[in-house]
Amino acid sequence: MKVILKKDVPSLGKRGATVEVAEGYARNYLIPRDLATVASEGALKALAMEQKATEAKKARQEVEARALAERLSRLEVVIPARMGEGGRLFGSVTAKDVAEALARQGVTLDKRKLEVEEPIKQLGTYRIPVKLHPKVHSELAVRVIPG
């Protein structure tokens, strides 16, 4: 019996895959647990439409990420920080601080997309890698000034 998987099933396949299974396995295990549905003509058409919509959404997200990457590469974020002796900061500048400074400039970005390996503890200009999409990466200039 041919079924379309609604969820990932170990040893069978991932969500959306069409697989051939024993009729008893489908009727007694997969379908009652809402793991699969019978692969009828209508269900196959619906699956094709869903996959097409998913691909279009992924392409749109990638285009938006590329536009944001271009904007971020031209942007410089200035963060004022309290300073102690020798140019060292009292605290540190973290990804959260950079995300908040970006928000003040009108760019909304999740702090988890900023790849700050270690918090910034000195004044200066830094290049922070930003991962916007699996295929789109950028860099952001961050300047820490006395404040």
Image (tube, rainbow, N blue to C red):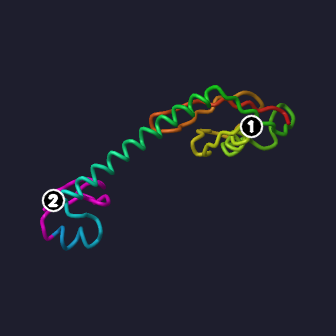
User: Tag 1: residue type?
Assistant: Lys
State the SS at label 2: strand
The residue at the point 19 percent across, 74 percent down is: 28
The residue at the point 71 percent across, 33 percent down is: 77
Q: In which quarter of the image is the N terminus?
A: bottom left
Q: Quadrant of residue 12?
A: bottom left
Residue 15 in picture, x, y percent from top left: 30, 55
Residue 139 counted in the magenta span: no
Q: Residues within 10 Å of mark 2 (few under 14, many from 20)?
A: some
Q: Residues within 10 Å of mark 1 (few under 14, many from 20)?
A: some
Residue topped by disc 2: 2
User: Tag 2: residue type?
Assistant: Lys
**Region of the chain picked out in magenta, as a range:** 1-24
The residue at the point 54 percent across, 32 percent down is: 67
Separation (CA) of disc 2 from disc 1: 60 Å
Q: In which quarter of the image is the C terminus?
A: top right
State the SS at label 1: strand
Q: In this view, does 87 lie above or below 93?
A: above
**Marks 2 and 1, the one that precedes in the sequence:** 2
Please tell me how many numbered marks the rendered image carries.
2
Q: In this view, does 72 lie above or below 93?
A: above
Q: Do the residues labelled 2 and 1 touch (CB within 8 Å)?
A: no
Residue topped by disc 1: 121
Residue 99 in picture, x, y percent from top left: 67, 42
